[in-house]
Amino acid sequence: MIFSSESPITFDDELTTETDVVVIGGGIIGVSTAWYLTRAGVRVTICEKGRIAGEQSSRNWGWVRQQGRDEAELPIMIESNQIWQTLSEEIGSDTGFRQYGVMYVAESEREMAEYRDWVELAKHYDLKSILLTAQEVQEQVHGFEGAWKGGVVTPSDGRAEPFIVVPAMAQGCQKRGALIKENCAVRGISTQAGQIAGVITEHGEILCRAVVCAAGAWSSMFTGHVGLSFPQLTVKSTVARTAKAPEGFLGNAACEDFAMRRRQDGGYTLAPSGIHEHFVNRDSFRFFGVFLPNLVESWSETTLRLGGDAPGGWNATRKWSDDEPSPFETNRVLNPIPAESTLGALRERLSRRLPALGNIDFVETWAGMIDTTPDVVPVMDQISSLPGFYLASGFSGHGFGIGPAAGRVMADLVQGNSPGHDLTRFRFCRFSDGSKLDRGPSL
Ligand SMILES: Cc1cc2nc3c(=O)[nH]c(=O)nc-3n(C[C@H](O)[C@H](O)[C@H](O)COP(=O)(O)OP(=O)(O)OC[C@H]3O[C@@H](n4cnc5c(N)ncnc54)[C@H](O)[C@@H]3O)c2cc1C
């Protein structure tokens, strides 16, 4: 079940007035960061405006994917894959992580050429991705209808259960001493001599020496409030989960028409490929120039709508004083309405491609607001103009799988340790230092 603002509050620790690090946002990035900070004995408070994992981190497809990653993300994702392998044991709760692979299937030579390029790249990282013939595709997914040219699979990739993972990790953080409070929006920051000195929450001030902003789709609004311009927009994506279904492909698979993941409960999580909605708001105009290439590239896949569900909506104020309610309190859990037309398209595509699932019941449908940057990779950085303020956001539709290692990286950054990977591509100043944005390629 997805979480909403009506879901019961389960994390309600009494806040202290002083800690080492405040994490803004209880999604997979914030909670993973806290997980590694608490492991190192750092005192952490997680402030979550709504519910732990209420937004993207429970609404995603549950793919833990190395295949097709941006090359700069790949070493971090490989580390994450390793973390996933022992995470259930560490947190004492089954995350559902299973290595059944990620498979992409192609009907065109152009896609097959991309897959061949990927397999070559994967060799440098010892990933053992494999090209599949059309017949091998049919053998992996019985009854998968299409004029397939072939596919590509990375057997070490996996799947996990988004509803379960982050709340379980959050409980683990609590056991190590972290304080976690839901319905606790951070409205702003306080500084001393230009450095972070604390945060202002709706329940009062917390003094701290570092703040990690992991506010997902709301990060741009928050950073804007503290004087930092972070180009970030959102797209809505609609998802369905099915009733228990006959066992088919056990991993994650995608073709041009839809994507599927076998779930731990015997059903599938399904979503149509290439259908998104963008709710035009003030940020759409503010960041129009930098996102224009994205809009052009995804024009046929993106429906533009006015106002609606975007963080803050069309009319929401972008200016508030820290002693009054902020837009974060107005919308506790971003819970967009799933698009009926998208679900209709999903049903039609499923009937055509995988008739065995054509009539299966959708027992739950939902939508999530995916946050994205113009170059479709996140920021993981300390902001040089605001020492003590760290940004970990903009994971652009693939932050669930990489989340645990991204948290480890952020925890080390905050402690002044080496992050263990080259983070140049993820620097915040790439949007303002005049460098040309590197927009891909990734599958
Ligand atoms: C439909 C869909 C499918 C996806 N599929 C996949 C997939 O298969 N694999 C994959 O790797 N990724 C996938 N993703 C992307 C992935 O879910 C995200 O990249 C990831 O969850 C981002 O985590 P986060 O912690 O940055 O953000 P979120 O999970 O959105 O968490 C941010 C949290 O910050 C809170 N917050 C915001 N502002 C404040 C404030 N001022 N004060 C306090 N709290 C605040 C919010 O309430 C929210 O809970 C998908 C996303 C969607 C929506």
Image (cartoon, helix red, strand yellow):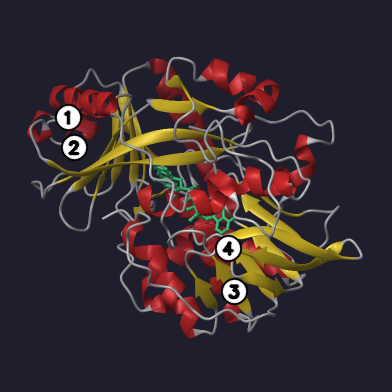
Residue farthest right in this picture:
193
Mark 2 → mark 4, Cα distance in angstroms:
34 Å
Instruction: Look at the numbered discs 2 and 1 and tell me whether their residues touch, using CB distance below 8 Å.
Output: yes
| Disc 3 C-beta below 8 A from ligand 1 | no
Mark 1 → mark 3, Cα distance in angstroms:
48 Å
In the depicted structure, whether residue 140 falls above or below residue 290: below
Of tags 2 and 4, the one toward the viewer is 4
Q: Position of residue 188 (x, y in %)?
A: 70, 58
Of labels 1 and 4, earlier in sequence is: 1
Which residue in the structure is indicated by mark 1? 144
Of tags 1 and 4, the one toward the viewer is 4
Of tags 1 and 3, the one toward the viewer is 3
**Secondary structure state at the residue bearing disc 2:** loop
Task: Using the image, tell me which numbered label, if any, was put on residue 407.
Answer: 4
Q: Residue at x 40, y 42 (%)?
A: 368
Find residue 407 and report its image quarter.
Answer: bottom right
Of tags 3 and 2, the one toward the viewer is 3
Task: Using the image, tell me which numbered label, if any, was put on residue 45.
Answer: 3
206 lies left or right of 312: right
**Secondary structure state at the residue bearing disc 4:** helix
Q: Residue at x 24, y 29 (%)?
A: 343
Residue type for callout 4: Gly
